[in-house]
Image (tube, helix red, strand yellow):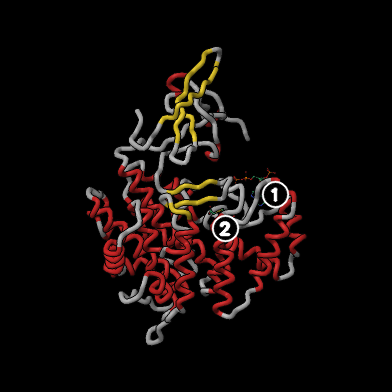
Amino acid sequence: MLKDNEKVSNKTAYLILDGTTYELPVMVGSEKEHAIDIRNLRKETGHITYDPGYGNTGSCASAITYVNGEQGALHYRGYPIEEIAQNGSFIETAWLLIFGRLPNYEERQRFRDLLTDNELLHEDLKHHFEGFPSNGHPMAILSAVVNAMGCYDPELLEIQTRQEFALAAAKVISKVRTIAAWAYRKSQGLPFMYPDPERSYCQNFLHMMFSEPYRLYDPAPEEVRALSLFFTLHADHEQNCSCSTVRMVQSTQANLFASVSAGICALWGRLHGGANSAVIDMLEEIRSGQEDIKGFLEKVKRKETRLMGFGHRVYKSFDPRARILQKAAHDLLKAKGIKDDLLDIAMELSEEAQSDEYFTSRSLYPNVDFYSGIILRALNIPVNMYPVMFAIGRMPGWIAHWYEAYGAGLEKIHRPRQIYVGETRRSYTKMGDRKDG
Ligand code: CMC
């Protein structure tokens, strides 16, 4: 049975298997993407599809974000990312992603107030930080404390109304910033700074990161703008690994806190949200002279390592976020009057790769993580916090997807199948009868 957001096209796919022809309906999306609907395939044919890594699998119909990898296009709720980056703020973008349209003035103000009202952590939650070693990775702390948040709002574990959802969403978006900043403070042995209700979302984050008692940190407007842009560009990217994780966990009817905490874990790896810090490690390695650019690219081509911040499952041309971040990195450095050798190395590395057949033939171009670290460095964010910064930015997207799946009603639990390739049935061997090896 089709759901409300599923549309059948006038095409039909035919599958001929063992001499029998099966008709498969073809679904069409609003941007004319097509998908062969195989929901009844196993029931009708006894076969499943095989798609490790899910490169050809549509796991849901979603109205949140559109990516066209061939054209390098990214739209949030229909709006091109370039227009959002130019005109919007992170908070407005969060509202857009979650609630489906741009907020009017009152709606945006109410959302800002809700975030401010929910920026404090429960004082008991503060004690959780004491349990982590000072060198504990901030991503581990973030996922653990975000999940623990649910213990302090048990009524939000079973969301019933839109108001309850809006409250839970605001709590997560607001507090994730406090938790992230405190994870950093803990690693530095610095006292926790409480959020300041007079400050905007991004100002407040930088305040909690860098203010000291009696010496408050006042970021420059260009720093606040750059951070808002960074978060905005990370706010959603449809069914990537972490978003799919959030939807998968949600499909068990798990609560919002647990679902987004799982998303943080999925984001951590260096092929996903951990790529931004891996890019900086790579650029530092080149700067230190351990490897020159040509030598490094040869190593990549021998497949001894990867060019971090390059390549994408969906984009087969320039990632539009990389283009915007490249310019933003230049603008921020200029505004702050600083020079960063790593940006020069990144530019040279990117140009060299883009004129090399190995990379062009595989459609490998800079992705969102290639230049983002340069911005974070200019904001004095330590490298191990980079995936955490990604997670703060991605929170509205994860929440929007959680709500979309939740709103779809009792969605089917996500449960892929497999092709079993292990031993066939055999009888249990008693201990004394087992041979070595
Ligand atoms: N450097 C060198 N070779 C690469 C790279 C890379 N960054 N990415 C892909 N390739 C090669 C790969 O070796 C393979 O070559 P061959 O056909 O000879 O075997 C071909 O390109 C296809 O690669 P793939 O691994 O099948 O592609 P994928 O779609 O599974 O992987 C990716 C996508 C993002 C994991 C990959 O491009 C990668 O590892 N990039 C580096 C890590 C990175 O920057 N991640 C951030 C992704 S964007 C933001 C996010 O999702 O967090």
Secondary structure of the residue carrying tag 1 is helix
Left or right of residue 288, residue 389 in this image: left
Residue neighbourhood size for the residue with mark 2, other residues' Cα within 10 Å, grouped as few (<14), some (14–19), many (≥20): many
Q: Which numbered disc, 2 or 1, marks the residue closer to the eye? A: 1
- Name the N-terminal-most of marks 2 and 1: 2
Q: CA distance from mark 2 to mark 1?
A: 20 Å
Q: Residue at x 40, y 83 (%)?
A: 216
Where is residue 379? Give x, y as percent.
51, 74
Q: x%, y% of residue 43? A: 42, 21
Up-down: is 118 above or below 51?
below
Quarter holding the N terminus is: top left
Quarter residue 395 falls in: bottom left
Amino acid, disc 1: Thr
Residue 360's tag is 1
Q: Which mark is residue 275?
A: 2
Question: Residue at image x 64%, y 53%?
Answer: 365
Q: Which amino acid lies under the numbered mark 2 shown in the image of this protein?
A: Ala
